[in-house]
Image (spheres, rainbow, N blue to C red):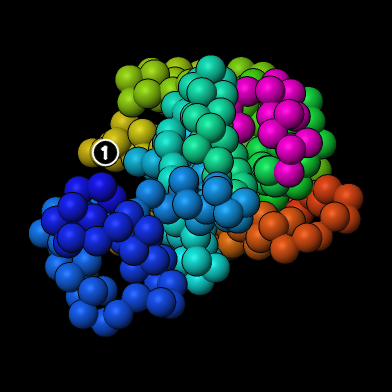
Amino acid sequence: MNDVARLAGVSIKTVSRVVNDEPGVHPSTAERVLAAIDQLGFRRNLSARNLRRGSSTGTIGLVLEDVGNPFYSGVTRAVEEIARLRGRQVISGSSDEDPGRERELALEFCSRRVDGLLIVPAGLQHSYLVPEMRAGTPVVFLDRPAGDVVADTVLVDNIGGTVEAVTHLAAHGHRRIAFLGDAPDIFTANERLRGYREGCVRAGIGYHEELVAMGPHDESSVATTLQRLQSMREPATAVVAGNNRITVHILRALAGSAERPALVGFDDFELADLLSPPVTVIAHDASALGKAATDLLFARLDGDNSPPRRVVLPVRLVPRGSGEVHA
């Protein structure tokens, strides 16, 4: 601002009035200031200005597992659209399933005085957020609940989804249905395993530990698991995949195979309907998850002081062919 004032030949106070659209500046003087601003590339520090005024910083923080995962890209897009309508910008980062990284990102966003936080938790300890929450920063957890604090949470029906997947496969004659899930300490993976187990019991086919493989998984480990499942004395004739990345690993491992097990994946993914055969999935709307969480956050910013809410969004089976193969 000193440089702008010097170039325009005015006081710093006059520059301040111009950049903040305050009255009392002659139009010709304002034009001179704006020309100096343009020449010098001056930009206001909006965060500093808003903090001085004790108002919003105009930002919300979003901590995700992996911004490269198409599912979380859908979540991010929904958050951004609502934030834009409410005059906020979104800053985001990936925790990579590392609780330390999650904490680092969340506290970094808080140090930048974001108006609120949306977090897909990587760990189970979130008491580090208590001072921020007490100071008035609203926090909403999505996709998974917090570990040791009570806060607004938006989830999907993980248990109901895998129950439906197993029920669907059993209805097509499958009795040996395998489950490939993510690391069991991840909330969603554990819930989907519970649903798989419950689905097996409901379908009367029993739960068999040898048909379960929990991650983390990569392409190589999935290929090895599938070979094991198919070489058993009673091989698996169907597979439930615990998330979209595992489904893709399975498809790659099965590429070119003459005999394929029936397959139902949890989470839809791009081009799943164009593969041969198209992939049957348990779908849930990533944008609905992001929208519900962001709506909760803005409700808190608008003064809603009701007790923390837990919202569970529905899922649905989308039959396309891969899950309709008969045993």
Residue sticking out furthest to the right: 307
Q: Is residue 309 left or right of residue 140?
A: right
Graded by Cα atoms within 10 Å as few (under 14), some (14 to 19) or many (20 or more), the crowding at tag 1 reads few
Counting from the top left corner in percent of width and height, residue 70 is at 39, 48
Q: Is residue 166 left or right of residue 276?
A: right
Counting from the top left corner in percent of width and height, residue 125 is at 70, 21
| Secondary structure category for the residue under label 1 | loop
Residue sticking out furthest to the left: 39
Residue beneath disc 1? 255
Nearer to me, 52 or 179: 52
Magenta segment: does it hold 129? yes
Counting from the top left corner in percent of width and height, residue 20 is at 41, 66
Counting from the top left corner in percent of width and height, residue 51 is at 55, 47
Q: Is 100 located above or below residue 282 in the figure?
A: above
Q: Which residues are magenta?
A: 120-136
Q: Quadrant of residue 134?
A: top right
